[in-house]
Image: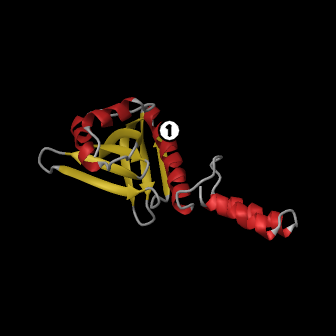
Amino acid sequence: MPTLEEVNRQIRALKNPYIFWTRKEIKALPEILSEGEQIKAITSGMLNSRTWLIVCTDQRLIFLNHGMILGVQQIQMPLDRVQSIDHQFLIFFGSIRVYDGVSYTSIGMILQSAILPFVKATQEAMAAYRQKLYSGGKTTGTGTDIASQIEKLAELKEKGHLTDEEFQEQKRKLLNR
């Protein structure tokens, strides 16, 4: 579990964090984040007439509201469950809508300049998370997944450029990285 100082350090390192009126939500983050979980983007907006903090980590999206009476309310979506993230601009503010395949969560009154950085960072985090999931967490040094590298080796073997022994040796090297 990260400390509040670590959470604040991660927030300060982000481009365009818009955290208007969310001090209580930020203070609650150390209890919510897992050890090693990294904040990729953060913004705030309105949902049901209350200010909510939206946090994109390297694992999930967290929608967080810390009210005086109702306590902490949160909605969590693992990044592999997120189907899409849409946005809309108005004059100075806009909204972000996140679909999980069954329902959606929409946050409005987000400062316009904070929307695109949040959406882009979330899309990048989704792609990286899915890449990690589907490649078993293993990638080559160039970031290409291992399955595609093995497919390329199989093509070389089929064309006669590699012997069966060479193919097996290269495949073993890729799988043992």
**In the image, 165: left or right of 11?**
right
Quarter of the image with the C terminus is bottom right
Give how far across and how far down residue 160 sits, in percent. Answer: 88, 67
Q: Residues within 10 Å of mark 1 (few under 14, many from 20)?
A: some
What secondary structure is found at the residue carrying circle 1?
helix
Residue positioned most to the left: 69
Identify the image quadrant of residue 102: bottom left
Coloring scheme used = secondary structure
* View extreme (right): residue: 160
Residue 80 picture location, percent across and down: 47, 60
Given residues 155 and 166, the one toward you in this image is 166
Q: Is residue 107 among what the camera can see?
A: yes
Mark 1, residue position:
116
Instruction: Name the image quarter holding residue 135.
Output: bottom right
Location of residue 8 with respect to 164 vertically, above or below: above
Q: Nearer the viewer, residue 145 or 124?
A: 145
Closer to the camera, 40 or 141?
141
Side (left or right) of 134 relative to 154: left
Circle 1: residue type:
Leu
The residue that appears at 45% across and 40% down in the rendered structure is 118
Quick check: can you spot residue 48?
A: no
Left or right, residue 66 beside residue 117? left
Task: Pinpoint residue 127: horizontal percent, then vertical percent.
Answer: 54, 52
Residue closest to the eye, 125 or 64 = 125
Q: Residue at x 37, y 46 (%)?
A: 36
Give the percent coordinates (x, y) of residue 88: 47, 44
